[in-house]
Amino acid sequence: MSITKKYTFQTSAEKDSWRADIIRRASSKNTVISKTQTGFKSEAEAVQWAEKELALFLKKQSARNKRQADKRT
């Protein structure tokens, strides 16, 4: 389920649909929901969306971190 220790995703069932959240580990005791999507008909659709978005999210964060590091040097 987890690609990295800092970022992961979670799915949960709502009334008649599913919800997917991308979660960031802010500290050892605190987590933050970075991105969420609701209205999936099945858990498989929610997991598929979460895996795809998590990969894009990590790619975007990596590029942002690289730009910030370049500014510091």
Image (spheres, helix red, strand yellow):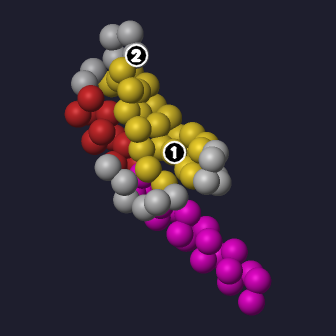
Q: Residue furthest top?
A: 15
* Callout 1 amino acid: Ile
Left or right, 10 with reference to 68: left
**Residue interval drawn in magenta:** 54-73
Q: Quadrant of residue 12?
A: top left
Magenta stretch: includes residue 1: no
Q: Quadrant of residue 55?
A: bottom left
Element at badge 1? strand
Left or right, 6 with reference to 68: left
Q: Residue at x 40, y 16 (%)?
A: 14
> Which of the marked residues, 2 or 1, is nearer the chain's N terminus?
2
Provide the residue designation for mark 2: 14
**Location of residue 34 in the rendering, given as x and y in whole percent from the top left corner:** 57, 44
Quarter of the image that includes the C terminus: bottom right
Callout 1: 10 Å neighbours few (<14), some, many (20+)?
A: some
Q: Residue at x 38, y 10 (%)?
A: 15
Q: Residue at x 61, y 68 (%)?
A: 64
**Location of residue 19 in the rendering, given as x and y in whole percent from the top left corner:** 40, 27
Q: Residue furthest right?
A: 72
Q: Vertically, is 57 above or below 71?
A: above
Provide the residue designation for mark 1: 23
Left or right, 42 with reference to 55: left
